[in-house]
Amino acid sequence: MQDSLVEYGFRRVIITITAILCALLEIVDSTIVNVALNDMKGNLGATLNEVGWVITAYAIGNVIVVPMTSWLSQQFGRRNYFAASIMIFTLCSFLCGNAHGIWELVFFRFMQGLGGGALLVTSQTIITESYPAEKRGMAQAIYGLGVIIGPTLGPPLGGYIVEHYSWPYIFYINIPIGVIAALMTLQFVRSPKYAEKKSRKEIDWWGIIFLAIAVGSLQYVLERGQEDDWFDSSTIVVLTISAILGFFFFIWRELTYKNPIVELRVLKNTNLRVGTILSFILGFGLYGSTFIIPLYTQATLGWTAQQSGMLMIPAALTTAFMMPIIGQLLQRGAKQQYLVALGMILFFLYSFWGYKILTPDTGADNFFWMLIVRGLGMGMLFIPITTLSLSTLKGQQIGQGAAFTGMMRQLGGSFGVALITTFMAHQTILHRSDLVSNLNTNSATVQQRVHGLQSSYIAKGMSPDVALNSAYQTMDYMVSKQAAVLSYMDVFLYLGLMFLICVPFVLLVKGKAPQKMNMSEAMH
């Protein structure tokens, strides 16, 4: 019954490349669209609200399918399921590029998300099992490259494509990679031997329905809450209730049904429980900071999409450089929890640094070392968290554990982006009213400033009353910009503190040295 899937030599290289290609495809696609939304809006005649659905639909498709991947792999055989997912993803990429209306595009993005969700978790399981137990840290390092660099690669790549070609090409770029990955999967990836497939009667249909309702509703609430004014919107209220009920019935169903679609009992494993929480926090920080920096550089500093995308590249390269080093350290018996704690301290330093340097006109050079520190921190978080989560699991549980950590990372990212946008909108209003209350029109400094601006406008040929009006508008604009910058500073400070608070908890976890774990009988 034991079917070792450890590969050696050339086959292992090919399988690793295939799995990373798939993980990259999936992740780059979740962020590459961000910079193209404006063009899509104009091209498809959509509102900003409608075009936001291009991102939301993909995320919902992703999050629904991730927890089910372990079960789907058993039903159809992992190789077949993985290859089918790549094909769905590739076909939907073509259909997205060819879409003629916004809702057609949104539907295909949802389908693309359903195909893509499997790529992430299954590629992680395939890589984990192709390496012998003592090289698991290295395997996670290689996989982590794709996961960490993916979100960072999206915006500059998207910016380049949109500036030089047109938006459908951000989808067409997936097609050749998808075709190659599908062929390589069918040729080289092996399926483990499973116990017999479940008959159709035994399939946990209710589990699937409750999960889709719960996760789909939650993802919608997180993605659209800020725009729809949270609980002032009846849709958000209804979906919040359906998310809560969905999760309640889903958990009850999975714990009582004989063949659950998601094996929740695997969470009895302490390391996996801790790893799942840490994955959530990692997603929060990773996606939150990848979201906020391009936003700040474009909205406040007026950079182009390509410029703000390029800014993130040195940090991504630092992470890439760190990954194999961390993999080596883990192989030599370094404790995962110490590395995670150090990574969190570095992330705190990066955030605090950001808090210190943000101004309405921070130069590009100021970001360089701060982002390098972020790159180092991310490198130290990803692999140790993943190996810690999966370190004491065996066989089929590895795939189930990988699905949990993957889902929590995605949900952490969605929570992060949703909370950050809401928090910033709230803080900007607060800071603005504070700043305005300090601007006393009778104060000599304020009058001097307005007078100076008025004179410069008169010198440009405006009449005195128009010039005065323009002077007040300029002051108002400066106040708004300053308020926005202060709210960005708050985000950096609080993100950093969140990571710092986690450090003592991480150090309390009992870790196992990776060499001692016997996961080589991986069957999943």
Image: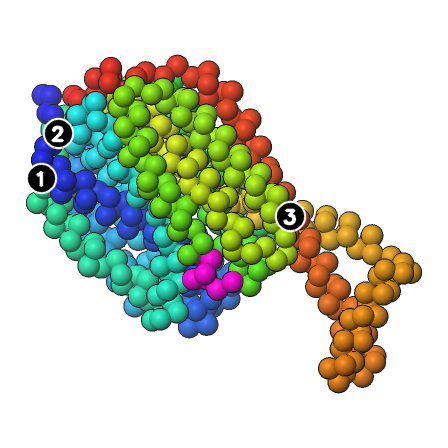
| Rendered image coloring scheme | rainbow
For the residue marked with disc 3, what is the amino acid? Ser
- Residue 101 in sight from this viewpoint: no
Figure quadrant of residue 310: bottom left
Q: Position of residue 300 (x, y in %)?
A: 59, 59
Distance CA(mark 3)–CA(mark 2)? 50 Å
Give the residue type that dot 2 points to.
Leu
Q: What kind of residue is marked 1?
A: Phe
Say what secondary structure mark 1 lies in: helix
Nearest the viewer among 68 and 400 is 400
Above or below 412: residue 457:
below
The quarter of the displayed image where residue 211 is located: top left
**Looking at the image, is mark 3 or mark 1 nearer the viewer?**
1
The residue to which callout 3 is attached is 487
Residue 257 sits in which quadrant? Answer: top left
Going from the N terminus, do you reach mark 3 or mark 2 first?
2
> Does residue 265 appear left or right of residue 476 in this picture?
left
The residue to which callout 1 is attached is 10
Give SS at disc 3: helix
What is the x, y in percent for residue 71?
A: 24, 33
Seen as rendered, the residue at the extreme right is 442
Q: On the picture, is 11 further left or further right than 468?
A: left
Rendered view: 350 above or below 433? above
Give how far apart the Cα atoms at labels 1 and 2 are.
14 Å
Q: Which residues are magenta?
A: 303-309
Is 306 inside the magenta-drawn segment?
A: yes
- At horizontal 55% and vertical 32% (from top left) the residue drawn is 498
Q: Give whichever of 487, 377 is nearer the camera.
A: 377
- SS for tag 2? loop
Confirm whether residue 315 shows in the render: yes
Q: Measured from the top left, where is residue 395 in percent x and y?
A: 21, 23
Label 2, on which residue? Answer: 5
